[in-house]
Image: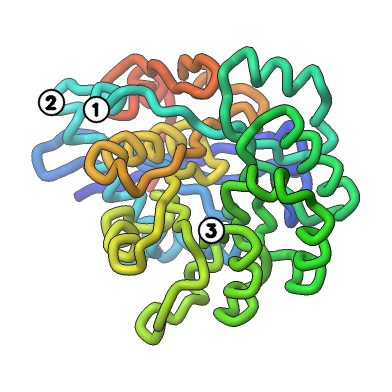
Amino acid sequence: MEIQWSRYQLNPRRALNSLTGPTPREGCLIRVRDGLGNFGYADLHPWPELGDTRLDEQLLQLKQGLKSSQIEQAIAMALRDADCRRQKKSFLDFGEPLKNNFLISDLGQIDDNLFTQLQNEKFSTVKLKVGRNQSLDFESVNHTAAAGFRIRLDYNGCSSPVALENFFSKLSADVLAQIEYVEDPFPYSEKAWARISDIVPLALDNEFCRVPWEQLNSSAFDVLIIKPAKLNPLKAIELCQKWKLKFAVTSYLDHPVGVIHAYDWALRLYKDYGSMALDPGCLTVNHYESNSFAAAIETSGPFILKNSGFGCGFDHLFEGLSWTS
Ligand code: MG
């Protein structure tokens, strides 16, 4: 199997989470040629801020024949892409469109106009990146609840048990009931997470690597976030079945190619494991300044509708890139 890559840069429109400012982000598209000579494509977009190995280091390792878990995932997705291209099928042929959550990474964006627009576009769930400013978080959660949305909060591990118990004690029971889950509230600790999960459901995302799965007696969380960019979705489903967890598939705030691959997994997992599935969160391309890949994806409100071409799409755009190894 031959592997090549093509580097890209994405320019965030605003801060993307509690750990990162709006600085340009580096990643690369991966092209593999499978045993039958078919090309397939995927994305590699490390987040060193969240503990991923830096892009340059991963590519250096790849040159030396070593594959990080992120590269393993990218290759598996590129092979799936190659297979669909060979069969002349698009990923989006594999299921009915799913409703994605709307992600608000900068709470300063929130106002009545935005919420009216989201209501008109038929969004049901809003995910807020929180943890930078507790009073702004409080105001934003109440505002989102008053607009009638189901709420997901993501702290990216940056809050604390005391701060959160205090925060949730100030919210009304009605507002608390609208919170579908709270993702990565603070670094994983079974005891401290279990206490918070008595107040609101918790979701495990980037703290996955800190959970001692082999020694677990019961899970202190209710939901597993499946990011196909770094977690093998079928292994994740096994954990969900074992620990009776729901799951939500999300993209990795990555390139549009990564977004469509995540959505492909969402469609397939929802078909096979629908009773465990919550709405996905793959609608993230608008968090960056547009590029030709982002412009190729057709969306309507919470739905990803179309991306012409086979596999993940973007056929002519891949042909226009230069590839190195
Ligand atoms: Mg998260």
Q: Determine whether, in the image, residue 62 is placed left or right of residue 110.
A: left
Secondary structure type for disc 2: loop
Tell which tag, 1 or 3, sits nearer the viewer.
3
Q: Which residue is mark 1?
A: 94
Q: Nearer the viewer, mark 2 or mark 1?
A: 1
Q: Nearer the viewer, residue 186 or 17?
A: 186
Gap between marks 1 and 3 measured at Cα: 27 Å
Along the viewing direction, whichever of 132 and 136 lies nearer the viewer: 136
Q: Is the CB of mark 3 within 8 Å of ligand 1?
A: yes
Side (left or right) of 158 relative to 37: right
Q: Name which residue lies at 35% across and 83% down.
A: 214
Name which quarter of the figure residue 25 lies in: top right
Up-down relation of residue 272 to residue 59 (above or below): above
Q: Which mark is first along the chain, 3 or 1?
A: 1
Question: Who's the residue at 48% across and 44% down the image?
Answer: 250
Is any atom of residue 282 visible in this view? Answer: yes
Report the Cα–Cα distance between label 2 and label 1.
13 Å
Q: CA distance from mark 3 to mark 2?
A: 37 Å
Q: Which residue is mark 2?
A: 87
User: Mark 2 is on which residue type?
Assistant: Gln
Left or right, 80 with reference to 127: left
Q: Residues within 10 Å of mark 2 (few under 14, many from 20)?
A: few
At 32% from the left and 53% from the top, the residue drawn is 233
Q: Is residue 136 above or below residue 54?
A: above
Circle 1 SS class: helix
* Disc 3 secondary structure class: strand
Residue annotated with mark 3 = 203
In the image, residue 248 above or below residue 143: below
Viewer can see residue 5: no
What residue is drawn where x is 44% and y is 81%? 212
In the displayed structure, would residue 83 be above or below residue 71?
A: above
Q: Residues within 10 Å of mark 1 (few under 14, many from 20)?
A: few
